[in-house]
C-alpha cells in the first residue's frame, strides 16, 4: 500500500523573508525549503502552500492591533511567495489568521503531512496542531531545518511544543 503524502509550505512570502517581518533565519532556510519542495515532488508527494492574507484594514483587526506591522496585504509584493518557490500544480490556501481550517480539512485525505516554513512559533505550529486535531491518526511532521521562528528562542519553543503534541520533528 502506498502512502499518500502532503508537503505544506507555510507562509514563505516576501514579507516574512525579506520584507516587513523578514528575518535572517527565514532567509537562511529558503534554500532548504526549495530543496524540500523538489525532493517531495520527485517522490510523488502533493504540495500545498499557505498564504498569510490581509486586507487594507489590517491595522483595525485584532491581529493588527496586537502586531501593528502591516504585512502580506493581498496583491502587494510582500504577499507573494519568496523568490524561487514554485507553486505550479500546488494547492493554495489563503488564510486571514495563523491556522487554516480548510487546510486541516484538506489534509485529512493524507496518511502523512510534512510542514515547513515560517513562523515556527505562530503559523507552523498552529497549522501542525490543527492538522493533528483533524487527523489524529495521520503522521504529522515538521522539518526543523526548513522552519524559522520569529526568533531562534521562539523557534526552539515551538519545536518543543510540537514534539509534546506528537508532531514528529525531522
Image (spheres, helix red, strand yellow):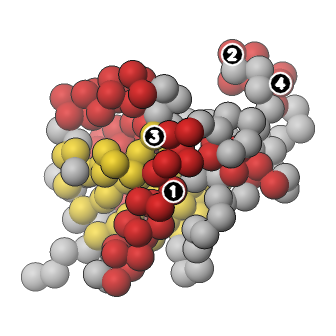
Among the two numbered marks 2 and 4 on one chain, the one whose residue lies closer to the N terminus: 4
Crowding at dot 3, Cα within 10 Å, few <14 / some 14-19 / many 20+, comes out as: many
Distance from disc 3 to disc 1, alpha carbons, whole Å, reads 10 Å
Please, what secondary structure does the residue beneath circle 3 have?
Answer: strand
Nearer-N-terminus badge (3/4): 4
Looking at marks 3 and 2 on the same chain, the residue that comes earlier in the sequence is marked by 2
Residue beneath disc 2: 66
| Residue at 47% over, 61% down | 31
Q: CA distance from mark 3 to mark 4?
A: 24 Å
Q: Secondary structure at mark 1?
A: helix
Depth order, front residue of 14/28: 28
Asked if disc 4 and disc 1 are in contact, CB closer than 8 Å, the reply is no
Q: Position of residue 129 (x, y in %)?
A: 34, 38
**Residue 33, how many percent across, how many down?**
45, 60
- Which of marks 1 and 4 precedes in the sequence? 1
Rounded to the nearest angstrom, the CA distance separating label 2 from label 4 is: 9 Å
Residue plotted at (74% across, 36% down): 20
The residue depicted at 67 percent of the width and 34 percent of the height is 21
**Res. 130 image quadrant:** top left
Q: Residue at x 60, y 69 (%)?
A: 84
Q: Which residue is mark 3?
A: 148
Of marks 1 and 2, which one's residue comes earlier in the chain? 1
Q: Which residue is mark 1?
A: 30
Return the mark for residue 59. Answer: 4
One can see residue 62 in this view: no
Left or right of residue 119: residue 3: left
Instruction: State the mark number for residue 56.
Output: none
Amino acid at each position: 500500500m502506498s502512502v499518500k503524502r502532503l508537503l505544506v509550505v507555510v507562509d514563505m512570502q516576501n514579507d516574512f523573508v525579506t520584507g516587513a517581518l523578514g528575518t535572517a533565519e527565514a532567509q537562511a532556510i529558503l534554500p532548504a525549503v526549495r530543496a524540500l519542495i523538489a525532493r517531495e515532488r520527485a517522490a510523488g508527494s502533493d504540495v500545498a502552500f499557505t498564504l498569510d492574507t490581509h486586507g487594507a484594514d489590517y491595522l483595525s483587526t485584532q491581529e493588527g492591533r496586537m502586531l501593528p506591522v502591516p504585512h502580506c496585504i493581498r496583491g502587494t509584493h510582500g504577499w507573494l511567495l519568496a523568490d524561487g518557490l514554485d507553486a505550479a500544480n500546488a494547492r493554495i490556501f489563503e488564510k486571514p489568521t495563523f491556522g487554516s481550517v480548510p487546510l486541516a480539512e484538506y489534509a485529512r485525505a493524507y496518511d502523512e503531512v510534512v510542514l515547513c516554513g515560517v513562523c515556527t512559533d505562530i503559523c507552523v505550529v498552529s497549522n501542525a496542531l490543527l492538522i493533528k486535531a483533524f487527523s489524529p491518526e495521520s503522521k504529522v511532521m515538521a522539518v526543523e531545518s526548513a522552519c524559522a521562528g520569529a526568533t531562534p528562542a521562539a523557534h526552539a519553543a515551538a519545536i518543543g511544543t510540537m514534539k509534546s503534541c506528537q508532531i514528529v520533528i525531522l
